[in-house]
Amino acid sequence: MFIKLRNNAEDHRDEFIWINVDHITAVYEHPKVPGGGLTTFVHGRVGAPITWEVEESATEVINLIREQNNAFR
């Protein structure tokens, strides 16, 4: 089960990334710069830990995960 997110990392901005929801271990928002807007980080583990910086909010990511989980019940 995958969710489609928009990559927000400097070198891949606005490219889509498909993330397997079974490998997500944490989702959180953090200020990109002090006093600036928030950016969302999705942590995963497939062998080695990995972190993706995405455009969607943490709430949007969680809702997409819920939708995927409900679609396969």
Image: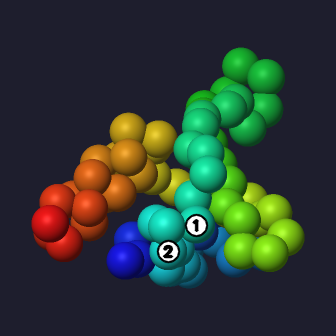
Where is residue 2 shown, x and y percent of the image?
40, 77
Helix, strand or loop status at disc 1: helix
Amino acid of disc 2: Asn
Q: Which residue is mark 1?
A: 23
Above or below 39: residue 18: below
Q: Name the foreground residue: 38 vs 36.
A: 38
Instruction: Give the number of callouts.
Output: 2
Q: Which residue is mark 2?
A: 20
Above or below 3: residue 66: above
Question: Seen in the image, is 9 located left or right of residue 62?
Answer: right
Where is residue 39 shown, x and y percent of the image?
62, 42
Q: Name the foreground residue: 45 vs 40.
A: 45
The residues tagged by marks 2 and 1 sit, at their Cα atoms, a distance apart of 6 Å
Question: Seen in the image, is 28 located left or right of residue 70?
Answer: right
Marks 2 and 1 in Cβ contact (< 8 Å) = yes
Q: Quadrant of residue 52?
A: bottom right
Question: Seen in the image, is 2 located left or right of residue 69?
Answer: right
The residue lying at 52 percent from left, 55 percent from top is 55
The residue lying at 80 percent from left, 75 percent from top is 47
Q: From where the camera sits, is residue 5 visible?
A: no
Q: Quadrant of residue 14?
A: bottom right
Assess disc 1: are there few (<14), some (14-19) or many (≥20) residues with their C-alpha within 10 Å of its C-alpha.
some
Where is residue 42 shown, x and y percent of the image?
61, 53
Q: Quadrant of the C terminus?
A: bottom left
Helix, strand or loop status at disc 2: strand
Assess disc 2: are there few (<14), some (14-19) or many (≥20) residues with their C-alpha within 10 Å of its C-alpha.
some
The residue lying at 50 percent from left, 74 percent from top is 20
Residue at the farthest top position: 35
Q: From where the camera sits, is residue 54 visible?
A: yes
